[in-house]
Amino acid sequence: MHLHMPHIALPEGLAGIRGLLAFRPDMTNPLRGFMEILMRGENSLTRGERELIATYVSHLNDCLFCKSSHGATAEYYLQCDIGFIEQVKSNYQSAGISDKMKALLTIAASVQRGGRNVSAEEVQAAKDVGATDYEVHDTVLIAAAFCMFNRYVDGLDTWAPDDLEFYRKGVKERAEAGYANYDPYR
């Protein structure tokens, strides 16, 4: 158990980015609007697939809050269990996901290591199994955004409960409300 002591004075009881948004409420609407478009807007990638990309990148960055909260959201959208999410995180190549998602997660992992690690071969491999330019674009943007969010949450040492049930509680309401309408201060 990580002994939580945030680096700055954050509101008590608000985990992860919720505490940060309460600290800087002027950032709330721009960040929520961005996330609403990226993660829930019209897209050939399902909401569940986008949450899975976010979960995987957050796992690679070892961000407990983000990998847990977005993992719970991916579980909800994909109607799967934690075992499936854990399999994707530990070895997505052997997980029960499409070849296209495997190729996109390869790209996401390259972004996580650094943007210049994405190769033309990885992009072509994704296109060869059906990924569109739009899907490649959004995979790179989701991966880059979650590197930022992971570093934001962990760089200020926000509170992140170890109990996965904490993240599952209210996930249906959060997922259905979306990023733009969900009240992060609850």
Image (tube, rainbow, N blue to C red):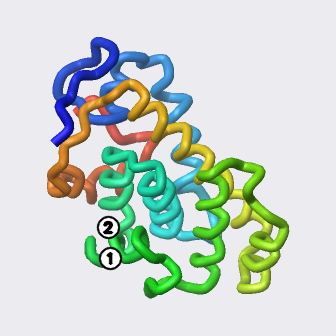
Q: Residue at x 58, y 78 (%)?
A: 102
> Which quadrant of the figure contains the N terminus?
top left
Question: On the rendered structure, is 139 left or right of 62?
Answer: right
**Mark carried by residue 46:** none
Q: In the rendered view, would you say 100 is above or below 32?
A: below
99 relative position to 92: left or right:
right
Please name the residue that numbered disc 1 is placed on: 79
Q: Is residue 31 above or below residue 145?
A: above
- The residue sitting at 35% across, 60% down in the picture is 71
Q: Which residue is mark 2?
A: 76
Residue 176 horizontal side relative to residue 98, left or right: left
Q: Residue at x 46, y 41 (%)?
A: 150
Residue 65 in which image quadrant:
top left
Amino acid on which disc 1 is placed: Gln
Whole-angstrom CA distance, mark 2 to mark 1, is 5 Å
Q: Amino acid at mark 2?
A: Tyr
Where residue 56 sits in the image (x, y, percent)? 47, 61
- Label 2 with label 1: CB-CB less than 8 Å: yes
Q: From the viewer's perspective, tell me whether residue 144 is left or right of residue 170.
A: right
